[in-house]
Image: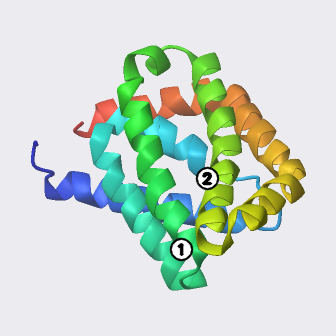
Amino acid sequence: MKRVNVQKMIILAVLADIIFVCKYMLASMPNVELVTFLVILSTLLLGKHVVYTVILYVFLEICTYGLGFWTVGYAVLWPGLVVITCLFRTQLENSNSKRAILAGIFGFAFDLVYAVVISLLTGLRSGIAYFISGLGFSAVHMISNYLIMWILGNTIYNAMKKARDSMFF
């Protein structure tokens, strides 16, 4: 694995801070977030090293909100999104519609994974009840992720790509 230099580490850390602040700013709107959007675009542009960013982001979330059942999901889902984005990088780089579909699917899968976590911690019935009671929120999560990527994806991707190319990546 290629070593990460200091300049790249600083960029990845600042990116984690930006993601955290964006999440915090939108906290009043349930299941509307820019985390998925920024993780997908950052991974496409900066590669697998964005996993350091999401680990730091999860750490910031834990420091702010404490440990809870959600910690397990965050520790798996955000690095998982980096891996999925890396695996499908060639298909996603030049297709905002595919990025929007991935973001939407991830929004729904996010809540599905939490239902599995709840099932493992408290029993299958609780997990099913959690999932069914949260379908409206899952739909909002899926649709908002899709629309955010669909509307902003190309513009922000091109701006981030230009910034990356003018720096050092």
At label 1, counting other C-alpha atoms closer than 10 Å, the crowd grade (few under 14, some 14-19, many 20 or more) is: some
152 relative position to 16: left or right: right
Q: Which residue is mark 1?
A: 61
Q: Residue at 50% of width from left, 38% of height from top?
A: 40
Kindly indicate the quadrant of the structure image that contains residue 117: bottom right
Give the number of the mark in front: 1 or 2.
Answer: 2
Q: Position of residue 139 (x, y in %)?
A: 83, 42
Q: Which quarter shows the N terminus? A: top left
Kindly indicate the quadrant of the structure image that contains residue 156: top right
Q: Position of residue 53 (x, y in %)?
A: 38, 57
Q: Is residue 142 above or below residue 79?
A: above
Kindly identify which numbered label has been placed on residue 113.
2
| Residue 30 seen by the camera | no
Nearer to the camera, 135 or 127: 127
Q: Secondary structure at mark 1?
A: helix
Q: Position of residue 94 (x, y in %)?
A: 48, 14
107 relative position to 20: left or right: right
Q: Residue at 45% of width from left, 63% of height from top?
A: 75
Q: Is residue 93 above or below residue 123?
A: above
Q: Position of residue 26 (x, y in %)?
A: 74, 61
Q: Residue at 53% of width from left, 45% of height from top?
A: 38
